[in-house]
Amino acid sequence: MRSTEELRHDIRSSSGPELLSGAAFTQPALTFHLSALLEGRGWRVKDAIRACYLERSYGYQLFNGTRPPTRRFLLRLALALELGEEEAQRLLRRAGKAELYPRSRADAAVLYGLTHRLTLEETDELLLSLGEEGLL
């Protein structure tokens, strides 16, 4: 795989757009994005597994890419990591999951939790108090 600088050089020196159809332009794997999120917060995978109330082996499978993450897990992680709304939406998009939709009461409650810095537990309680399915 070429480095970003090599790719930048190739784009500048290219005589045509053929190189734009190559595999160098695929989105980084979700596992890399998850790792970057954890690293940015000084967390290890085991910290995230604990914060998201996951069973240990299942959690490691989610983080190493052997199991695809559910939307519910991604929302748990977003709340546990105290992501902002945009970061959480980006995480959902990267995973190919539906973004939070404000007209959905459950999604609106999660958006409220993200924007008002509620904990995962507090957001779960809010969801349950609204008659929605909780995240935990």
Image: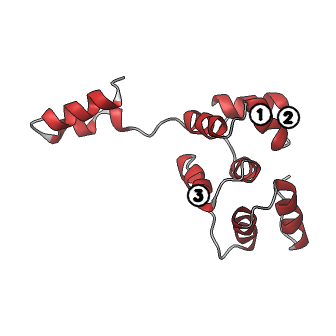
Return the mark for residue 4.
none
Amino acid type, mark 1: Gly
> Farthest top residue?
1
Which residue is painted at 57% across and 46% down in the image?
95
Q: Which of 60 and 117 is in front in this view?
A: 117
**Residue sticking out furthest to the left:** 15
Residues packed near mark 3 inside 10 Å, few (<14), some (14 to 19) or many (20 plus): many
Q: Residue 90: x, y in percent?
A: 55, 53
User: Disc 3 on helix, strand or loop?
Assistant: helix
Q: Is residue 66 visible?
A: no
Around disc 1, counting alpha carbons within 10 Å, would you say few (fewer than 14), some (14 to 19), or many (20 or more)?
A: many
Mark 2: which secondary structure? loop
Say which residue label 1 marks: 59
Q: How crowded is mark 2: few (under 14 residues within 10 Å), some or many (20 or more)?
A: few
As measured in the structure, the alpha-carbon distance from the residue carrying label 3 to the one carrying label 2 is 25 Å
Does residue 56 appear to the left or right of 29 in the view shown?
A: right
> Which circle's residue, 1 or 3, is located before the other in the chain?
1
User: What residue sits right under mark 2 in the picture?
Assistant: 55
Q: Which mark is residue 89?
A: 3
Q: Earlier in the sequence, mark 3 or mark 2?
A: 2
Q: Is residue 130 left or right of residue 114?
A: right
Residue drawn at point x = 73 percent, y = 69 percent = 112
Question: Which of labels 1 and 3 is toward the front?
Answer: 3
